[in-house]
Image (cartoon, grey):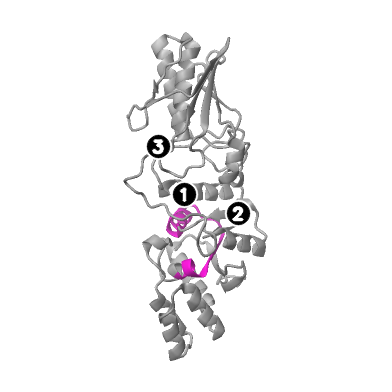
Amino acid sequence: MPGEENDFMETCAAKPSLRRGWTTGACATAAARAAVEALFTGNFPDPVAITLPNGARPSFALATHEIGPSWAAAGIVKDAGDDPDVTHGALVKSKAMRGEPGSSVQFRAGEGVGTVTRAGLPIPPGEPAINPVPRQMIREAVREAAALFGQPDDIVVEISIPGGEKLAQKTLNGRLGIVGGLSILGTTGIVIPYSCAAWIDSIHRGIDVARAAGVAHIAAATGSTSESAAAKLYGLEDIALIEMGDFAGGMLKYLRTHPIPRLTIAGGFAKLSKLAAGRLDLHSKRGAVDLSVLSAWIAQLGGTVAQVADAAQANTALEVLQIAKSAEIPLADHVAHLARETVSKTLAGSGIEVDVLVVGRDGQIVGRAACPRVGRP
């Protein structure tokens, strides 16, 4: 992706003209509803209707259906609308089997669906990575069919996504301790293109997992280059790394009420310049770096009139940094200190120690602000 340090994301700005789609949870529910009806009657409803949490009742066309002596399975091809979803076009399958009497609805992970291995997620370790809302949607769909046909709801539902283990390599699942495949996600059943909500939710879940594992020091980075620099400097494992992207505000507000002892913020010069100026949304669409502010900081740090003027007329934040470096003006350190002040104000009362790393495009640390209370680098 373009960007000063291969940012994790380009944009999440919602565009009303874009077409909405369906979550993996909605697709799994529709497939389960069809499979259960076929288990009871021998016939698959096609299309099959389900009820979403908001009460809407969309219908889904079946892509596959199979039936055996004691099971039935159906598949839905996921349509994520115009969202760049990794699972768009994937086949989401549900297999329904009779369970033990009195067991009600049970869940299994099939091919391409992960298993939770770490605490801190909404689903406990050892369980299939099927989130709470999809589980409830599937339960309700199974019970609807059971009531309609006078059958018990003692059904085992196995969800699978062929090829899901490979697709999961493009997600945060491995870092969160979800192994073997994808998660069955969704809180509404509907995918809103370029929604920020999913990104911020993944940040929150990363913090939850780190807290549950007793991690005392996490690093939140704006991009992969700065993340690698922080991980190398402090010897941090994947579980301690948070893909913050542009969502400094969303991450910090969550940390304020879900604290971890120490936080490192790592990012490129331009994005951390915005944080230093007090902005918590670091995306370029929310505003460019203010070069007049950078030039004013150069003046505060003893820059000459000519250096300040050159900075004010620069084309990019990187050019301003190069001007400062040539003049041996510690602008990147200054940005790191001001960014730490912004972070500390947002985290006021949490007790979290904060340090900041400004990372160049080559992965080298060009500016730092240490934890003030303990003087650690």
Q: Earlier in the sequence, mark 2 or mark 1?
A: 1
x, y (%) of residue 191? 41, 39
Q: Is residue 215 visible?
A: no
Image vertical order of residue 341 relative to residue 100, above or below: below
Q: Is residue 10 visible?
A: yes
Between disc 2 and disc 3, the foreground one is 3
Check disc 2 and give the amino acid type: Ala
Q: Which mark is residue 21?
A: 3
Image vertical order of residue 157 relative to residue 257, above or below: above
Q: Residue at x 35, y 44 (%)?
A: 18
Mark 1 touches mark 3? (CB < 8 Å): no
- Where disc 1 sits, the SS reads helix
From the image, tell me which residue sits under label 2.
Answer: 240
x, y (%) of residue 23? 44, 35
Closest to the observer, 259 or 334: 334
Q: Residue at x 33, y 33 (%)?
A: 54
From the image, tell me which residue sits under label 1.
Answer: 199
Residue 266 magenta-highlighted:
yes
Q: Earlier in the sequence, mark 1 or mark 3?
A: 3
x, y (%) of residue 30? 44, 25
**Local crowd size for mark 3, using a 10 Å CA cut-off: few (<14), some (14–19), many (≥20):** many
